[in-house]
Amino acid sequence: MSAVRDVVTVLEGAGYVVLPKPLTIAGAEFEFDAVARGARHSHDLVLVATDLVPRQRLQRLVSGLARSLDLEASRRPVSLILLGEIASPDRIELERYARVLIISFANPSVTEIEDAIGVLLPLGLPEAELVHGGDPLNDVLGVLGPLGASPDHISLIRAAQDGPEAVRESLRRYVNDGTGWNDAEATIE
Amino acid sequence: MSSLPILSLTVSDFRRLQGTRVLPFDAPIVLIHGPNGTGKTSVLAALELALTGEVRSMLRHDDRYIAHLPFLGQPYATVRVDVAEELQSEAAGQVLTVGGSRVDGQPAFASAAAKFYSERCYLDQASLGRLLELYQTRVGKEESALARFVNELLGLEKLDALREGLSAASDLRLLKKLAVGLDEAAVRAKSAESSVKEQASILEESRKEIRDSRGGLLEALAGVITVDVASSNEELIELSRSAPDQNEAHVAAEAAATLHQELLALSGRIAAMSARPSAQRIEDTRAAAESAVVEQARWQIDEGQVVARWDADARVLGLATGSDPSRALEKAVESAAQELTAAAGVAAQIDAALVELELHRRNLETTEARIAEANMHSSSLVEGLTALRSTTASTSNCPVCDRDFTEISEHSLLAHIDKKIEEFTSHGQLLIRLRSEREQAAAEVTQGQSLVGRLESQKLSTDMLAQLEERRARLLELANRADAVAAARRRGSEIADRALLLKNAVEDMEAVSSEEVDVRSQIEEYAKLLGTEAVREPVDLNAQCQLLIESARSELATQQDLGRRYRATQDASSRLAEAMSREAHAIQAVANALSESNEWSARHEEGRRRQGVAREVHDAATKARTAIVQRVFTESLNEVWRRVFTRLAPNENFVPRFGIPTATKAALEINLETAHRSGESSGPPQMMLSAGNLNTAALSLFLALHLAVEPLVPCLVFDDPVQAMDEVHVAQFAALIRTLAKQNDRQVVIAVHERELFEYLSLELSPAFEGDQLITIELGDRAADEDQGVTRHIWKPDTALAG
């Protein structure tokens, strides 16, 4: 049963609220290994079951639950997380009432659970600054480090704002200045 | 949720939509249902046109698609869309009219938003099946759409500008071309360095020269002055100045040389003296001279008179008794004989001339007689005939004989007379020749007379002839005595010569004696000059002179040696001074060169240091670029794609992803591949995925590209995206859309044609919280209903669950 616990943990981590057992809708009770519902912007109802439950019973449970929700005029989408193997016809039967997410590993890892029930979890998108990491020139400063970035380094880096020619000109002037070259007289001072 | 991008669409007579329809879009999710042919795709095309000004999927097929946009039979169609304020173009709220070949009016979105919508928000039905192909196709040199999206995402322009601009820093040759100051500094530094070496070498040479010339000066001074070897160079030079002047030494050497020369000359005089006779010989010579004088007197008495007499006789006869009297005598005898012979010749010539003269005289007389006769004969006849002619002028009768001349001649008488006169006249010519002969005979007589006269004048008189005979006799007598006189004369001459020779010899000897006195006094003087005592007689003058010459030569050698030493001292001193001057210059030059070298080295090093700084920046930019590429591809693009794909196809073991490109290259090569869930890389999606999952890969890539960037237009519009999906995929897709709409703030518009799917999605996408909405738009028959098929689903609290 640790796998069920892991699934519940993943669901809770994604903001789902675990409901007490047994699940009661319109006076009817439904025994699942675990049940959770979405919170905030989600109103999903998530059922967790294992393949220890006989197929016929599981189908009765799910179809009964669907009917009960209909009776209550509930529009909650229902998902069934099934731990273990399931034959294809059984699965098709179940899918008439609910989204079926199967975790077929014996002892699934958290990642395997997350992959299998991904659609129920928030879609994590990269941080804004990861995608648009601000100015990539800052990354250059980052590579140089605070001690490595002298005003000379920074001056060259800043020239990149105006394109490669500006950088080249900046480099030319920088090196020429170092050698005392005077452009105006086209000679060394 | 932030404000929704699309609020409502009004469309009139557009493609399959007849009449005007106003469709609300102001909900997080808009679900459109229409069986095929009811205008489902037309709504989304109208939306795209109204938002962006074009319909891309149609444009790809036919660039004149605008003509087909109005409803069949209508001249034009109009569309209008209301959008969120921040996305509006300046022409927001305007109606776009399309027809023919043109679109009138401005799209609702500003250009950036329009572009974003076309590329990253709207997935039309036609494109889904070939999305990967569309993404990866390159037209000409343009980047593929995928590469463009990725580059926009990477934002590497500045880094590439930095790397490109600093590329010269990694190549010294290129950098020198760019920054010529660095090249100049390198060249100058190298030149200055070699100049330092050169000047140092010159300095070393001048120091060696100082050592050498100091040694030379010490050596030279040692022969002249006492020197302290520890003296400084300057002291040595000063000391060398105090040494005797080279000129003085020169004068002394010159004097010694002169003295030596004079002594050599004196030696010559002594040698000449010794060749002359001695005193004893003077006395002998004097006696011989006196004896010769006596002998001379005796000859004068004995033979001198004979000679004198002969000479006197000779003088009487007119002979010159000078150098060779016998020859003169011989000539005189010969001359007398010739004179006598000539006189005999003249007498004979006179006789012959007289005979000749007589002959000429007779000839003259004969000629004159003939002339006289001829004269007389011819003149009288001519005169008679002439007189006769005048009387016969007119007649042919002879005046003499009176006969008629014509009887005997056919010519006239007058012609006859004229002919006779002419004949007599020619007789005159004979006379002329006779006269010429007379003149010649007369001339020959005259010549003969003249010759006889001249010969007579040459003829000697009898006295003279007698005198000449006597003279010859006397000359012959003188000749007889001539031999004896000549012998006497020779003896006298010999005696006189000897006497003169001896006299001269005596005079010479006396002169020699006086020369010796002079020489001796000179030797004494030279001895004094040389500081040696001359020894008086009878020591040999020559020996003394030789001693003095030796002494003078020694003095000369001494003076010359001194001169050489002084000169050596001066030379060594000058060399030392010059070497010290060169050393001073060289020290200054080395210092200057070092200063120059240091300056240029410093400039060059600074240039190189700056190159290093630039290279650090370049390398850091490369590292940063690599890091960004890695980060964007692995943590952003691939991660988002993986998350989306695994949601839609949880059972697929191969997950599509971007191959990580080589970051150092400026142009990124975008490759798609797959990775097994174990993490291992595998082949491209087209090879590894089933057709269904390949569609899912494309759809998920579309979503990933939308989600990986800042959502400029936060909306997603799908035209029947689930056509090829199985149930599982549809359920997953629905869940994903719900997440995107409700958790990731994307407005989602989905058009489907299957009724069942529409129903399912309506349930799945129903409002989940307070304020949440779902709009469903049903085309086809439902459009005729009062609500025109538009249903706005509002959230209602769900009471089904107790907990």
Image: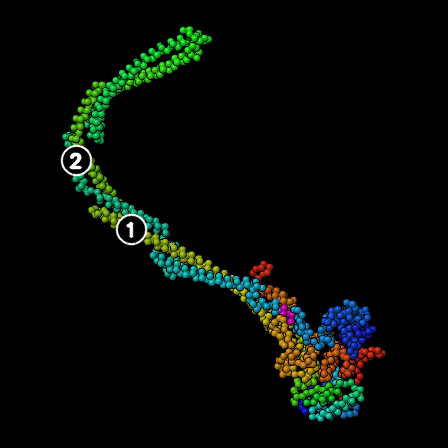
Total number of numbered discs in the rendering: 2
Image quadrant in which the N terminus of chain B is located? bottom right
| Parent chain of label 2 | B
The part of the chain drawn in magenta is B156-161
Which is more toward the observer, B579 or B63?
Answer: B63
| Parent chain of label 1 | B
Which is more toward the observer, B31 or B513?
Answer: B31
Colour scheme of this structure image? rainbow
Marks 1 and 2, the one that precedes in the sequence: 2
Mark 2 sits on what residue?
Answer: B292
Residue A104 sits above or below residue B217 on the image: below
Residue B566 sits above or below residue B755 on the image: above
Amino acid type of disc 1? Answer: Arg
Which is more toward the observer, B466 or B297?
Answer: B466
Q: In the image, what residue occupies the spot 56% across and 64% down?
A: B176
Confirm or deny contact between disc 1 and disc 2 (CB under 8 A).
Answer: no
Q: Is residue A167 left or right of residue B308?
A: right
Secondary structure mainly formed by the magenta segment? helix
Residue A61 horizontal/vertical position (percent): 75, 91
Image quadrant in which the C terminus of chain B is located? bottom right
Q: In the image, what residue occupies the spot 77% across and 69% down?
A: B67
* SS at circle 1: helix
Say if the magenta span includes residue B758: no
Residue B167 horizontal/vertical position (percent): 59, 68
- From the image, state whether disc 1 or disc 2 is nearer to you: 2
Q: CA distance from mark 1 to mark 2?
A: 50 Å
Q: Is residue B775 left or right of residue B560?
A: right
Say if the magenta span includes residue B159: yes
Which is more toward the observer, B150 or A186?
Answer: B150
Residue A5 horizontal/vertical position (percent): 68, 89
